[in-house]
Image: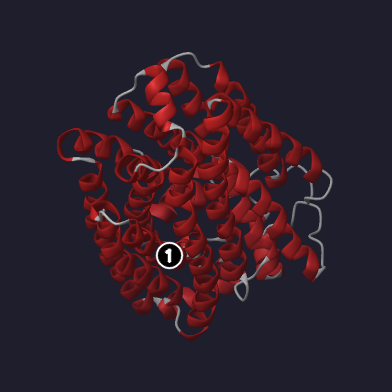
Amino acid sequence: MRKSKQPAAPASSAYRWLVVAMLWAISLFNYGDRQAVFSVFPLLQREMRLDPVQLGLLAGAFAWVYGLGGQFAGMLVDRISRRRAILGGLYVWSGICVATPLARGFPGLLALRAAEGLGETFYYPAAVSMLSDYHGPATRSRALGLHQTSVYAGTIAGGFFAAWIGERYGWRWSFLVFGGLGVLLGLLLQRYLREPVRGAAEGAGAARAADEPIAAGETLRIIWTTPVVFLLMAAFVCANFVAVVLLSWMPSLVYEKFHLSLAMAGLTATLFVQVASMAGSAAGGWLADRMQSAMFCGRVVVQAAGVLCGAPFVVVCGLTGSVEWLIGALTAWGFFKGLYDANIFASVYDVVPVRARGAAAGFMNTVGWAGGGVAPVLVGVLARRHGLGFGIAGASVVYLAAGGILVVAAVTLRRTAGITKQLLPVEL
């Protein structure tokens, strides 16, 4: 049993959406900080004489630590105040970002990137768990979909402004600015962000059941013996693999192939795909809520459509020699990516108990980012032999695998819908 009674969640409908806005701002810096390093890859390569595999390891180190820490972070946020986890994580990763300019070589930079992954790992399990207690099944996909748009805005901000600052003042100032602004945001939101009652959005019975955090062993049993959860996690590994490839290597591909300035390469590689993903995420949240009310596998169907439709455009992104075709492919891929992203956690929350939501989100991050962390290193190896564009295009095969897994998950959910719905009032 938790040692102290949780504070009541604010009844105001307006505050529920204000929470989305506050977490949106924090998430923007979460992704802006991690994207910043990719936009200054050419500067780091020049100053520290790094090869493609070393650059890939910088991306991989963050992803591996971020993912492996997700398991611990997810179980912890089911036991502590999510407000403290969110704001504490913001201060930690922003502080590490501010310290990054102290790196004078590859080993130091690699260590700081890994440490930043550990600092950021607490945010998402805590944030999506908190949002699920402010928004019930009727608005959950929309709330999480809107929150997801911050990922895209943060990626654009990190992609463009880090490169812009780096070109003018050096790459170290990029990290000082992003980290410093993150600390200021935390101080501002310290007063306004409140902890909700766990399970409040599901009704009184769920709130009482959620008061006792689920044991770690039981969480593992639920995750690994529930076929749909296992399938959704496997699909996330594949989808995140592709996302990490494009986010980490696309700025370099645009810079090298089309000979744009560093800032314009960073902007081109992020703006079109991320703005389109915002639209796709909003549409995916709305569509999934509508489809879920009609059939219990509705959210997963939307996810499957997103990755299957996006796969051909990943190929075009890697192989095209035209800026116009690249922009079109990035835009289309981004929209379909948003359909998938809006429902990553909402689909899992349909089939796991309230008191295991933080742990489930943590495990999702663990498997997704541990697998995704291989992506930039693998593409770095392929780039040595066949070129960067070939490596990026090849990631489309992994996207097709994600689509197939999600189709199986949707069929499985449809077959077990009656049993799962009976459990919803008590277990979920």
**Snapshot colouring:** secondary structure
Q: Residue at x 52, y 61 (%)?
A: 275
- Give the residue furthest to the bottom: 294
Question: What's the amino acid at mark 1?
Answer: Tyr
Residue with the mark numbered 1: 340
- Give the residue furthest to the top: 104
Q: Residue at x 34, y 78 (%)?
A: 415
| Total numbered labels | 1
> 358 or 205: nearer the eye?
358
Percent coordinates x, y for residue 180 in the rendering: 69, 31
Percent coordinates x, y for residue 416 in the rendering: 38, 76
Q: Is residue 308 visible?
A: yes
**Residue 375 lies in what quarter of the image?**
top left
Q: Is residue 197 visible?
A: no
**Residue 225 lies in what quarter of the image?**
bottom left
**Residue 93 lies in what quarter of the image?**
top right
Which quarter of the figure is the C terminus placed in?
A: bottom right
Q: Is residue 64 left or right of residue 287?
A: left
Tell me the crowding category of disc 1: few under 14, some 14 to 19, or many 20 or more residues within 10 angstroms, Cα based: many
> 64 or 309: nearer the eye?
309
Q: Residue at x 56, y 24 (%)?
A: 172
Above or below, 295 relative to 153: below
- Say which element carries label 1: helix
Above or below, 110 relative to 33: above
Percent coordinates x, y for residue 300 in the rendering: 40, 70
Q: Is residue 10 left or right of residue 350?
A: right
Percent coordinates x, y for residue 114 in the rendering: 47, 28
- Give the residue furthest to the left: 385
Q: Residue at x 52, y 73 (%)?
A: 283
> 267 or 94: nearer the eye?
267
